[in-house]
Image (spheres, helix red, strand yellow):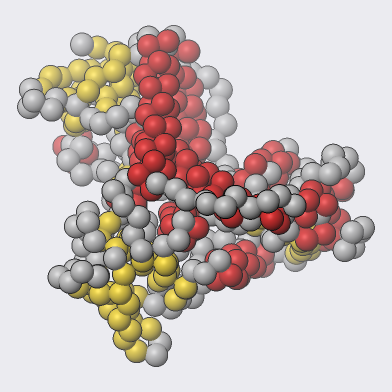
Amino acid sequence: MSYDIIVIGSGPGGYVAAIRASQLGKKVAIVEKAELGGICLNWGCIPTKALLKSAQVFKYLNHAEDFGLNKPSDITFEFGNVVARSRGVADRMSKGVQFLMKKNNIEVIQGAAQVLPGKKVKVTAADGTSKEIAAENIIIATGARSRELPALPQDGKKVIGYRGALAMEKQPKSMIVVGSGAIGVEFAHFYNTLGTEVTIVEFLPRIVNVEDEDISKQLQLSLKKSGIKILTNAEVTGVDTTGDLVKATVKTAKGDEILEAEVVLSAVGVVPNTENLGLEAVGIATERGKIVINDFCETSVKGYYAIGDVVKGADLAHLASAQGILCVEHIAGEKVEAIDYGNIPGCTYCSPEIASVGMTEAQAKEAGYEVKVGKFPFSANGKAVANGAADGFVKVVFDAKYGEWLGCHMIGDGVTEMIAEAVAARKLETTAHEIMKSVHPHPTMSEAIMEAVEDAYGHAIHI
């Protein structure tokens, strides 16, 4: 069985690569050992957002009076129904990928894959039977899984990872979330909104540490205001799961502290799925567990490519998709442009949301730039105030010498829908002057971007 391209893994990197390859006239097979759509569609991005939407609606109902409405007398929910809706959304999206595979004449082969020398792939089915297939080019897109710390072994019941948090049978009364990256703060917000007592434990000095410092400070204020307890500069050194409650030993600057909760969620990042893939036998180079690639996603062995969470860079679905398209267009001989990894947006869907692209203020200064910084609060934005979502702001960072837009950082309601303006503008090398002279519709929250730029240059109108 021979193909032009074999894709291993059907997440947002793998299935997008397969579709683009088919569009370019290639004979394609995709190998998947679990559900089509990978972790993102089934156990990550999509079902998480479904849970968060349920939490948002519940919050709206409880704050109906803030909008001049009568608060419903009996606002309740069945936790199982909330989870079931989330799983239904994931199932629908997975079926959508199945449809796309058929539409684009892509052969789906179920089983665990292992790359072999000579551009071959061994596929082992669930019943233990195996077969070999071959292709001119092989793309590895096997994604990542929840990282387990030695001091925090996951048992799937009292100590869980993100998969467990997505499909709990009942809502816990209390939860300790270890780690404050996107996964940690999103689940902390979801469970807290539904009434779970939540404590976040973060090893670093501030939460969402990859974000601009002003963003971290604002989110910490917002989460604490909602009732979430936060410990920074803190480390979980062990857990005792023998009792009804989990006892977590937390090392802090003041000494050890014992926290108790019904469940502990380990949200300390992910590790790439590169084991048992046959990389060593083929000679594919890795570095710290991730596959080494060039600008076109080709590994150290010609004809073998890798994309997504198995390669160096941010673990983001949209980056994996971009790499998949770049990869197959390069294989097909198209003229392609290397990805600008400095212009990949990041989004966190807690409340308030976070969206950012480019350098933080600190990174820009460390890189030697003299910067102009502007901020515009949503409390001065008419649409945000009308929406009852005045918390947060837009922050922009420009190079003072040439006007290059170095970074854009937002925290507020719906900002994940706004960040693409900054991404496109930076891609087009737009200057501050051009943003200020681009008329933004009123009233919209997007006006805050224009006004933040105006603030950086001393032209702010509404603050």
Can you see residue 43? yes
Q: Compared with residue 280, is residue 152 higher up or lower down, i.e. above or below? A: below
Residue 384, image x and y in percent? 75, 52
Q: Is residue 439 left or right of residue 20?
A: right
Q: Quadrant of residue 453?
A: bottom right
Q: Residue at x 75, y 52 (%)?
A: 68
* 21 with respect to 363 (left or right): left
Residue at position x 27%, y 27% from top? 32
The residue furthest front is 73
In terms of depth relative to the viewer, which is nearer, 244 or 74? Answer: 74
Instruction: Assign the C terminus to one quadrant of the image.
Output: bottom right
Q: Total label count?
A: 0
Q: Is residue 339 left or right of residue 251?
A: right
Q: Position of residue 441 (x, y in %)?
A: 85, 39
Find residue 72 and report its horizontal and vertical position in percent.
Answer: 60, 50
In the picture as drawn, the residue positioned furthest to the bottom comes out as: 254
Q: Which image quarter is the N terminus in?
A: top left
Q: Could you say which quadrant of the image residue 223 lies in?
A: bottom right
Q: Residue at horizontal 63%, vertical 67%? A: 218
Q: Image point 42% across, 66% down: which residue?
A: 198
Rendered location of residue 356, percent (x, y): 62, 52
